[in-house]
Amino acid sequence: MLQHFKVQPMFAGGQLPGWTFSFYISSARCTGDYMPDGTIRWTSAPPADEEEVKRMIHELMTFHVYE
């Protein structure tokens, strides 16, 4: 389960091209960039269960950014 999920636009004004995010999972901090096409670029070491975490990030981005 992701804890303390935070997302913010990469650039002032909230315009594309993407967002930065951070969260904790199993006491490890993870960070990355969420691109407009849904691609995730990790700026930290990816979590062990990367595919499951990506699914959770996509769901959270839908809730926080696109609604």
Image (cartoon, rainbow, N blue to C red):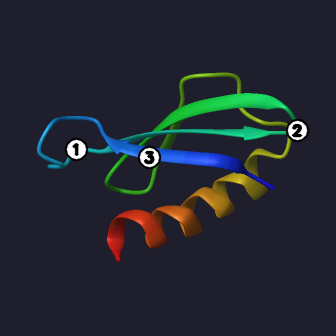
Q: CA distance from mark 1 to mark 2?
A: 30 Å
The residue to which callout 1 is attached is 17
Residue at left 51%, top 45%?
6
Q: Residue at x 45, y 70 (%)?
A: 62
Question: Please, what is the three-letter code of the amino acid marked with disc 3?
Answer: Val
Residue 14: x and y in percent read: 18, 49
Image quadrant for the N terminus? bottom right
Work out how far the residue at label 2 is from the one at label 3, CA to CA, in angstroms.
19 Å
Figure quadrant of the C terminus: bottom left
- Tell me the tag on residue 7: 3
Q: Which residue is mark 2?
A: 26
61 or 42: which is nearer to us?
61
What residue type is disc 2 on?
Answer: Ser
- Label 3: how many Cα within 10 Å (few below 14, some 14–19, many 20+): some
Q: Quadrant of residue 60?
A: bottom right
How packed mark 2 is, by other alpha carbons closer than 10 Å (few <14, some 14-19, many 20 or more), is: few
Location of residue 22 (image quadrant):
top right
Pair 3/1: label in front: 3
- 16 lies left or right of 6: left
Kind of residue at disc 1 = Pro
Q: Nearer the viewer, mark 1 or mark 2?
A: 2
